[in-house]
Amino acid sequence: MEIPLLKDIVIIFGLSIVVILLFHKIRVPTIIGFLLTGMLAGPYGLKLIDSIHGVELLAEVGVVLLLFTIGIEFSVKNLIQIRKSVLMGGSLQVFLTTLSIFFIAMLLDLSFAEAVFAGFLVALSSTAIVLKIIQQQAQVDTPHGSTTLGILIFQDIIIVPMILVTPILAGATENVGGSLLVLAAKGIGIIGLMIISAKWIVPYILFHIAQTRSRELFLLSIILICLSVAWITSSAGLSLALGAFLAGLIISESEYSHQTLGDILPFRDVFMSFFFISIGMLLDVDFLFQHPVTIVLVAIGIILLKSIIAGSVTLLMGFPLRIGILVGLALCQVGEFSFILSRTGVEYGLLDGFIYQMFLTSSVLTMAATPFIITLAPRLADGILKLPLPKRLISGYYSYTRIKVEVKKDHLIIIGFGVNGRNVARAARAAGISYVIIEMNPETVRSEHAHGEPIYYGDATHEAVLA
């Protein structure tokens, strides 16, 4: 019996290995290799894949797991610290980008509704690609990394009102005001559930699961928590990605975050490859060859416009010029949620076939350029800072709050907190040496954590736990 999805996975993995191995030798980012794999295997390439929908489902899981790990590495305290980036930065970036595209679209003779919708599409950036790169570079907690994350979180929230407004733009009659009120009420309920879960429910569940010493049971439990919260937010009308991020935040507040991260990373990396491959499948090579100059110019225009707007918004929040440049360039691409929104636009007649293909092709090009742009961004920023610019522009016009991240350095890692572990900890305290304890006994972790010991549940054979 032939299983089409299994055959597709074998083809994708086999082709990916060949392409990425080649790209690794010529030092091209892995993400580009996955995009090329999708382009080759997809409906506009060699037509090797039967079930594109199956690949898209696996890609969705990859995005969920990525946002889950981002949430674990972040924390509720850090999220509160970047509230200005989420609320002010995100709203300004979306509004100014939408407004700019609206005026450009009106000049190109698009209707009012089509121009507004085009602004919606371009305003969103790629949460998956940007956060994947920032996470790989260990820059999530940096000023530009946290600001970028804050703006992306706002974009993940605003996508839902955009989808609700789309029928109104198309002339359909729907009670959008009532829908938004219901959505806001659901959002408040989800926040309340998250607080209760982080404080009582999840620590209680994971404590009893960890007592079994079953790695399989622990892994199943954290995947269940991740997918459950993502499903709840999706059912409430919010995005899966936002729910996964909230699930990660819930676990980040417990002593089990390090072990969770160590267990989930291999699955995240595998499923994320499907996301990038699914994006590559959207690229219509024939359409690209028919309109190469127009598509490239549109892609460059999007990159420049979004970089300038996001960078300017960052400066308005008081950040120095260098951070503004890094944030602007990080958010220069069109996002994956724009593809979902574009399908809604096609259904309601806000995008015709030519504009839809132009949007898809140029958007994929902006995504493909993102790894190179983010890699080159620090050099570009350093070059711009050498220009004779006003000192206030370089240093920032207003004060801003840095995320305070405690980074241990030259510390001990005590594996196991039995008799010997306690003796080592006692000696370290006496000598004034900082330390961290990794322990597999959940009861020991709970009791010692209550006494103020820097102790975490985890298996020290996992690199992610030690990191």
Image (spheres, rainbow, N blue to C red):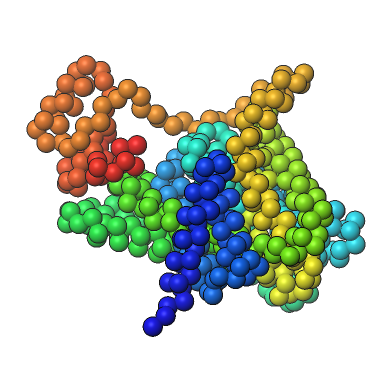
Q: Nearer the viewer, residue 277 or 392?
A: 277
**Picture layout, residue 431 above or below residue 411:** above
Q: Is residue 338 visible?
A: yes
Work out which residue is located at the far top of the displayed protein and give it: 431
Q: Which quarter of the rendered picture does the N terminus lie within?
A: bottom left
Left or right placement of residue 461 versus residue 5 in this view:
left
Q: Nearer the viewer, residue 52 or 331?
A: 52
Work out which residue is located at the far bottom of the displayed protein and give it: 1
**Picture layout, residue 334 above or below residue 414:** below
Label count reads 0
Work out which residue is located at the far left of the displayed protein and give it: 419
Q: Quadrant of residue 255?
A: top left
Residue at 52% x, 33% y is 142
**Location of residue 100 in the rendering, given as x and y in whole percent from the top left corner:** 80, 50
**Location of residue 38 in the rendering, given as x and y in whole percent from the top left corner:** 57, 61
Residue at 62% x, 27% y is 399
Q: Which quarter of the rendered picture does the C terminus lie within?
A: top left
Q: Quadrant of residue 312?
A: top right
Residue at 17% x, 46% y is 441
Q: Quadrant of residue 428?
A: top left
Left or right placement of residue 335 versus residue 286 in this view:
left
Residue at 39% x, 59% y is 226
**Picture layout, residue 90 above or below residue 113:** above
**Location of residue 122 in the rendering, given as x and y in whole percent from the top left corner:** 72, 55
**Location of residue 48 in the rendering, given as x and y in whole percent from the top left corner:** 55, 70
Q: Is residue 101 visible?
A: no
